[in-house]
Image (spheres, rainbow, N blue to C red):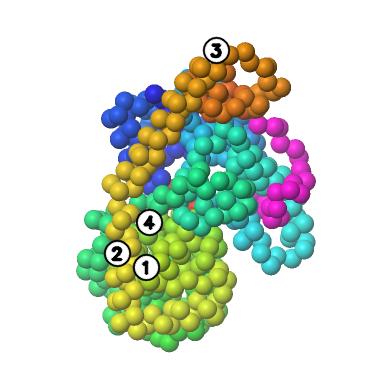
């Protein structure tokens, strides 16, 4: 049997790719052949994976997305594969891995409360309108068998916005290496505090992210101004315009209590130095850094639009408030100035992270792949039986039932041979009235990567 993976940008050694390859290695051991469809020729660490290049030329983000979708659709349509998993919003797949959550939900958060002029400008953005349509085609595709959701938040958004049945939505959290990330990293605290000249008795709030604006760094600085010294905020990770946030700290009079660390620092030592992890993110469906902080025994303050919020509430491991609620954020941070509260919530956070060890998450994925591949075999057998009876010619390629897709192109369960051509994007398409999608954004304001070390 053969599994096809569609991922436009594949970076061997990246956090997402490492998790993926752990499950793929287990499938290879079970004699499942794997093909990777990507723009990049970078070799996966698993040498047995076949790489298929789909790298047409493009001009700008709109044509990049459209050209890849068209190219990979044609390639999948002519291939003999049993199951197709996509990490990009293309409709020629059986399984979609929703690492980035729901695009329409991100836009709703990004432009909540924006001026009418901003909303109008974003509504005319061709790139984001294309992405909204591609997302709707994906989730309403008759070939879609399963969606792997990184949190219950994402599952609920997909179900409520697109009407995808519960049976197709599988919540599998990102894994976190609880053997490498643990409370013992507290031994790193003295060195980190000395490096940044922070008082030993300070309560350290850590914000680790891959995008300062998206992760709410400005709100965290403003909230810190409401807390008494020697409370201190460390912002670590990759982000644009670091100097802008240092200037913001000066405006709020807390320049001596805010440290913007070098983007290349080892986050493990900063988890060890911190007392509390804070991430008032605008939208983060798969919050790696939050899970890592929990594994280190840190209580967490995050927003309602974080995929980790549900774990914090379920396990009493921290606090949750709406994104942009600076007063609420400050109140929750203030409550964690009490050592006893931090100790109790931190212990709960560690317990909540333990079931997310890599081996456990890999097993969940392998079992899901097993069930989906078995269903593909069953569908193929039904397709063979159906060919024995007189058939009525379908009115169009998308009218072929999903269970008989293999009768159209042998070995393809998704019907990808028929549903491969993505429509050419228009210059400035109108918003789909039926989609319920929020106003779109221009290409420059597309969401930054999620928090932590995700590439």
For disc 4, the neighbor class at 10 Å (few under 14, some 14 to 19, many from 20) is few
Q: CA distance from mark 1 to mark 3?
A: 55 Å
Q: Disc 4 designates what residue?
A: 264
Mark identifier at residue 351: 2
Q: CA distance from mark 2 to mark 4?
A: 29 Å
Q: CA distance from mark 3 to mark 2?
A: 56 Å
Labels 3 and 4: the sequence-earlier one: 4
Mark identifier at residue 388: 3
SS under mark 4: loop
Q: Disc 1 designates what residue?
A: 315
Q: In the rendered structure, are the residues bearing label 1 and label 3 in contact, judged by CB atoms less than 8 Å apart?
A: no
| Residue 112 visible at all | yes
Residue name at image x 29 percent, y 64 percent: 351
- Measuring from the top left, give residue 354's x and y in whole percent: 29, 58
Residue name at image x 50 percent, y 67 percent: 303
Looking at the picture, does residue 123 appear above or below residue 312?
above
Q: In the rendered structure, are the residues bearing label 2 and label 1 in contact, judged by CB atoms less than 8 Å apart?
A: yes
Labels 2 and 4: the sequence-earlier one: 4
Task: Answer with the quarter of the image where residue 294 lies.
Answer: bottom left
Residue name at image x 38 percent, y 80 percent: 336
Looking at the picture, does residue 242 appear above or below residue 125?
below
In the picture, measured across the screen, residue 156 lies left or right of residue 61, that is left
Which residue occupies the extreme bottom position in the image? Answer: 228
Which portion, as a residue range, is magenta? Answer: 422-443
- Measuring from the top left, give residue 343's x and y in whole percent: 29, 76
Labels 1 and 3: the sequence-earlier one: 1
SS under mark 3: loop
| Residue 13 visible at all | no
Q: In the rendered structure, are the residues bearing label 3 and label 4 in contact, judged by CB atoms less than 8 Å apart?
A: no
- Measuring from the top left, give residue 302's x and y in whole percent: 47, 68
Whether residue 78 is in magenta: the answer is no
């Amino acid at each position: 049997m053969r599994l096809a993976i569609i991922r436009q940008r594949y970076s061997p050694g990246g956090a997402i790719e490492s998790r993926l390859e752990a499950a793929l290695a287990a499938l290879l051991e079970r004699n499942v052949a794997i093909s990777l469809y990507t723009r990049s020729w970078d070799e996966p660490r698993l040498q047995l994976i076949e790489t298929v290049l789909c790298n047409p030329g493009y001009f700008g983000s709109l044509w990049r997305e459209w050209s890849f979708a068209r190219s990979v659709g044609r390639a999948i349509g002519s291939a003999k594969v049993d199951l197709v998993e996509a990490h990009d919003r293309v409709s020629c797949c059986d399984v979609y891995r929703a690492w980035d959550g729901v695009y329409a939900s991100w836009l709703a958060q990004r432009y909540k409360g924006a001026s009418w002029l901003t909303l109008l400008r974003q509504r005319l953005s061709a790139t984001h309108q294309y992405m909204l349509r591609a997302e709707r085609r994906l989730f309403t595709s008759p070939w879609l068998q399963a969606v792997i959701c990184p949190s219950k938040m994402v599952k609920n958004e997909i179900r409520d916005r697109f009407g995808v049945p519960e049976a197709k939505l599988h919540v599998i959290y990102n894994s976190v290496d609880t053997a490498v990330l643990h409370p013992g990293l507290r031994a790193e605290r003295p060195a980190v505090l000395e490096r940044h000249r922070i008082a030993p008795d300070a309560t350290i709030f850590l914000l680790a992210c891959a995008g300062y604006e998206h992760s709410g760094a400005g709100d965290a600085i403003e909230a810190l101004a409401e807390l008494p010294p020697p409370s201190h905020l460390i912002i670590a990770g990759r982000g644009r315009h670091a100097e802008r946030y240092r200037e913001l700290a000066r405006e709020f009079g807390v320049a001596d209590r805010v440290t913007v660390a070098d983007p290349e620092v080892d986050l493990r030592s900063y988890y060890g130095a911190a007392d509390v992890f804070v991430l008032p993110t605008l939208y983060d469906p798969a919050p790696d850094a939050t899970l890592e902080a929990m594994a280190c025994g840190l209580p967490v303050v995050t927003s309602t639009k974080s995929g980790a919020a549900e774990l914090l509430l379920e396990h009493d491991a921290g606090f949750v408030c709406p994104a942009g609620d600076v007063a609420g954020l400050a109140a929750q941070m203030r409550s964690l100035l009490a050592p006893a509260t931090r100790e109790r919530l931190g212990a709960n956070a560690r317990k909540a992270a333990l079931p997310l060890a890599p081996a456990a998450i890999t097993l969940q994925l392998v079992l899901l792949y097993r069930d989906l591949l078995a269903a593909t075999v069953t569908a193929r057998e039904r397709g063979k039986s159906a060919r024995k009876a007189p058939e009525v010619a379908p009115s169009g390629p998308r009218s072929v039932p999903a269970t008989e897709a293999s009768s159209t192109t042998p070995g393809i369960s998704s019907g990808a041979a028929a549903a491969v051509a993505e429509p050419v994007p228009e210059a400035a398409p109108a918003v789909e009235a039926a989609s319920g999608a929020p106003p779109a954004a221009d290409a420059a304001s597309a969401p930054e990567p999620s928090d932590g070390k995700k590439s």
